[in-house]
Amino acid sequence: MKLISMGLLAGVLAAAAGALVARRRYVVVTVEGTSMAPTLHDGDRVLVRRRRIGQVARGDVVVLEPPSGPRLDADGTRWNIKRAVALPGDPVPPDVDGAAERVPAGALVVYGDNPHSVDSRQRGFFPADRLLGVALRRLGGAAL
């Protein structure tokens, strides 16, 4: 009996450790709004892998906090889901206001797939230190 109990305990502990590691690497975020339509829709849930700016590629769908300034919600915590179009050192796209010719270190340029999205075209550079990660796939759907 003790052998079965010890094996069961080891299995439970291994599962708990695996869940903890997964939680530190992955997050599920619910899309609110239409800025990423037609790729993502309001209410879609996406699996996000935590990443730093050096692990992001142009074209990745990223999840980040909005830059400083007016927030759209009462508590100031709202994730933005946008597409990375320019990374540190890249040329600044012509439709982004800014005196810089290149995206500065610690910043990125992001656009929503919906042309009516509020993104870097209106808000300028998004701070890389507010990056949560890269959206991998829509839950119940295909990779992004």
Image (cartoon, rainbow, N blue to C red):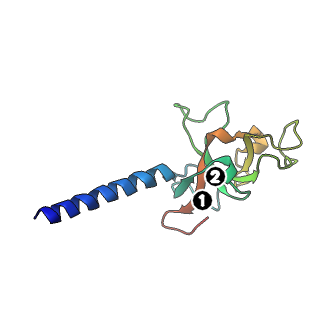
| Residue under pointer 1 | 40
Q: CA distance from mark 1 to mark 2?
A: 12 Å
* Res 122 → quadrant: top right
User: Total label count?
Assistant: 2
| Residue under pointer 2 | 62
Secondary structure under tag 2 reads: strand
- Of residue 76 and residue 47, the one placed in the foreground of this image is 47
Q: Which amino acid lies under the numbered mark 2 shown in the image of this protein?
A: Val
Q: Which quadrant of the figure contains the C terminus? A: bottom right
Position of residue 28 measured from the top left corner of the image (x, y, whole percent): 48, 53
Q: Which quadrant of the figure contains the N terminus? A: bottom left
Q: Which amino acid lies under the numbered mark 1 shown in the image of this protein?
A: Leu
Q: Is residue 52 above or below residue 2?
A: above
Position of residue 82 measured from the top left corner of the image (x, y, whole percent): 66, 51
Label 1 Cα neighbours within 10 Å, binned few <14 / some 14-19 / many ≥20: many
Is residue 51 in view from this perspective?
yes
Residue drawn 72% across the image and 59% down it: 59
Residue drawn 26% across the image and 59% down it: 10
Left or right of residue 52: residue 14: left
Left or right of residue 118: residue 31: left
Is residue 28 in view from this perspective?
no
- Which callout, 1 or 2, points to the residue nearer the camera? 2
Position of residue 115 measured from the top left corner of the image (x, y, whole percent): 74, 53
